[in-house]
Image (cartoon, rainbow, N blue to C red):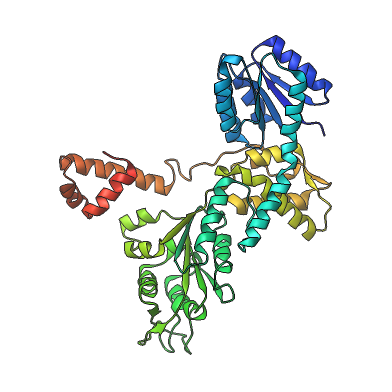
Amino acid sequence: MKEVILVIDDEDTQREILTGFLKKLGYKVEKASSGKEGLSIIANKAVDLVLTDFKMADIDGIEVLESIKKLNPEIGVIIITAFGTIEKSVEAMRKGAEDYLIKPINLDELELIIKKALERKSLISENVQLKKEISEKYHFSQIVYSSKVMEEVMNLAARVAPTKASVLIRGESGTGKELVAKAIHYGSPRKNKTLIIVNCGVLNENLLISTLFGHEKGSFTGAIRQTRGKFELSDKGTIFIDEVGDLPLAAQIQLLRVLQEGNFERLGGESPVEVDVRVIAATHRPVEQMIAIGTFREDLFYRLNVITITIPPLRERKEDIPALLDHYLKIYAEENSKKIINFSKEAFDLLMKYDYPGNVRELKNIVERAVILSRGELITSEDLTENIKRKEKRKPTTLYGTLPQQIETLERALIQDALKQSEGVQTRAAEILGISERNLRYKIQKLGLK
């Protein structure tokens, strides 16, 4: 398949010369007479490489570059510049441009630069393999990534894995918090001991407390025998408490005791049970706001929050998408006995531009569905769901934004009003709000208030 190159230049003669030259080299060429027109083409068509003039009437080459990288970081960009703007072109390279050319353009040099830029895509699979080898060194072979931000996440996880420290993993649903927790456990001295996973979001309060800490015979209706909880079963190992933000206050007290004293009591019991358990917790909830409204204990948060690992949503690390697509394509093609080798250019472009509100979990489901529906060796745009083809963006869950956004808006208004009433005296403002002065100072800093 021919690579598609987009030429953006507001000079008609220069644009036509470049277009003709590239067509002779065998490339498919799109052209635009302005930066905005070029970005419109990229938003609606699959493009492999962009040649853009630096100085244009509407938006300059750096603005074009920045917009392209936000939309699809896999698209290469080459800047064309006059002598007087070389310094800015070098700046563009620091922001992700493949290279820059000085006018008048040497066409032989241009041909070499284009080949080099397009060859970069073929190296993606090799880079993915290299990342995989590094992951295996730290026992993180289950996690696929290519982005720098995820490399930093994994480096932090690798550094904390050999220690005994409690870890709090934060991130939206579907980002891979459980995978990171497993990587930490299997990269630790406890790797040969038990790893137990408990999801707080799927159990009611009484059942959750019994599940975590066990119960004595007769402690409640149906308790016909003594039962050990997950903490006892994971002694000398690791317990991963998923969705810890859903933990009821009664269970939070017990968990705090385990973290502080290394013991707890079974439901209905009187004697403490000693355990040596490493705790890894995860949540997608805004814990600081839950502390402010009294649904999560502040002291427990600080005990869990010895090390925080924050996993960014997939829409903020699009460099990971190609590796993840390739990874799950191979898995589901094998599972379904299909000889599917790749994605079509159009399908790949749509998948790169999609926002993935469900993160990696959603990407995984998208690939599985596409593999099942595919009729050939390539997954095409016809195999994708309509919302992907419409390139829908992530939308707020309500007309006025998400619940955390609404809470933050209300907090901001209440604090500003209290500060106004107290004429800026924080002690009085805290009394008005019914919170501690320390908590007020934290919120003022967090919300950026003066």
Residue 409, visible in the rendered structure: yes
Residue 413 against residue 310 in the figure, above or below:
above
Q: For residue 102, what is the image quadrant?
A: top right
Residue 105 against residue 145 in the figure, above or below:
above
Residue 56, visible in the rendered structure: no
Observer-nearest of 33 and 139:
139
Q: Where is residue 127 in the image (x, y as percent from the top left)?
A: 69, 47
Observer-nearest of 149 and 444:
149
Q: Position of residue 229 (x, y in %)?
A: 48, 80
Residue at image point 62% right, 37% down: 73
Q: For residue 52, what is the image quadrant?
A: top right
Residue at image point 36% right, 57% down: 290
Residue at image point 51% right, 60% down: 159
Observer-nearest of 136 and 59:
136
Q: Position of residue 88 (x, y in %)?
A: 55, 22
Image quadrant for the C terminus?
top left
Q: Which residue lies furthest to the top in this view?
A: 13
Residue 175 against residue 96 in the figure, above or below:
below
Q: How many marks?
A: 0
Observer-nearest of 384 and 131:
131
Image quadrant for the N terminus?
top right
Q: Position of residue 123 (x, y in %)?
A: 73, 43
